[in-house]
Amino acid sequence: MAGDAEFVNGTQADDRATQIEIRQACSSDRDAIGDFLAGLSLRTRYLRFFAGVMPVTPAMLHRLAGGGMADGDAASGGTGGDHIDALLATEDGAIIGHAMAVGTRGSSGAQVTEIGVVVADARQGQGVGSALMRALAGRAQARGATVIVMDVLAENQETLAMITNHFPAARHHRSGPYVTIHVPLARYQEEQPREPFARTRQPQPCGQPGHDRKRHLRQRAAAGLPVG
């Protein structure tokens, strides 16, 4: 993207920010994903997984890497025929963000996608999380999903504000300490005055020739925090 200006929160991004790249997770990323999770603070892990201390098992890493689906496997990491879409945000080859969408069928038979995003502590608030969310939303819509569902802790006001900013049509339902958010994808692209999804390129598929650092896709963003 030489010659293209990138912006974060309305100001021109520095050289470091422009090198953030988003790609599809592969089974070969499992160890790196484990290291990424181990480097998160207890607070960030709690906001994403609702547990500060959690066992990082091979089965968990398998699922976070896309359940093997990126390598052509069946949805062995999911249950009940779930479709798993996992993306990574990287900088200089190191993982700084992870996002996962799990596609299921709702009670009405409509395709529903549940999304979870987490960003390294040092890179929060710099657009990484929202770029991952936009990428997952577009990919889910392309697969035929009509609703995105996100569970967020009610105390996580920064994330709730960010979601409202990016998804004006989102509906919030409070249940105890959690807020469940439903975003109708049919209206998603019609309500993007702040950050048009059309300007966000698709992540590089796993194992494609452009998988090297210079060919990774760069993302524009406005804000990024862990999303449950």
Image (cartoon, grey):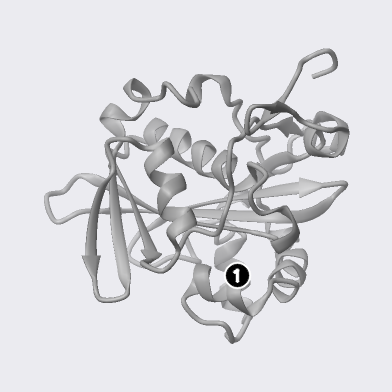
Tell me if residue 78 comes above or below residue 200 in the rendering.
below
Residue sitting nearer the eye, 195 or 75: 195
Q: Amino acid at mark 1?
A: Thr
Image coordinates of residue 161 in percent, x first then y, are 42, 48
Left or right of 107 on screen, residue 90: right
Please name the residue shown 67% across and 50% down the image.
88
31 above or below 10? below
Q: In which quadrant is the N terminus drawn?
A: top right
Residue 34's spot in the image, x, y percent?
A: 71, 72
Disc 1 marks which residue? 44
**Res. 115 in view:** no
Q: Residue at x 73, y 76 (%)?
A: 38
Q: For residue 215, what is the image quadrant? A: top right
* Residue drawn at point x = 34 percent, y = 25 percent: 191
Which residue is at the front of the view, 216 or 120? 120
Asked where in the image residue 184 lies, by quadrant, the reply is top left
Using the image, determine if residue 124 lies above or below residue 190.
Answer: below
Neighbour class for label 1 at 10 Å: few (<14), some, many (≥20)? Answer: many
Give the SS element for disc 1.
helix
Q: How many marks?
A: 1
- Quadrant in the picture for the C terminus: bottom left
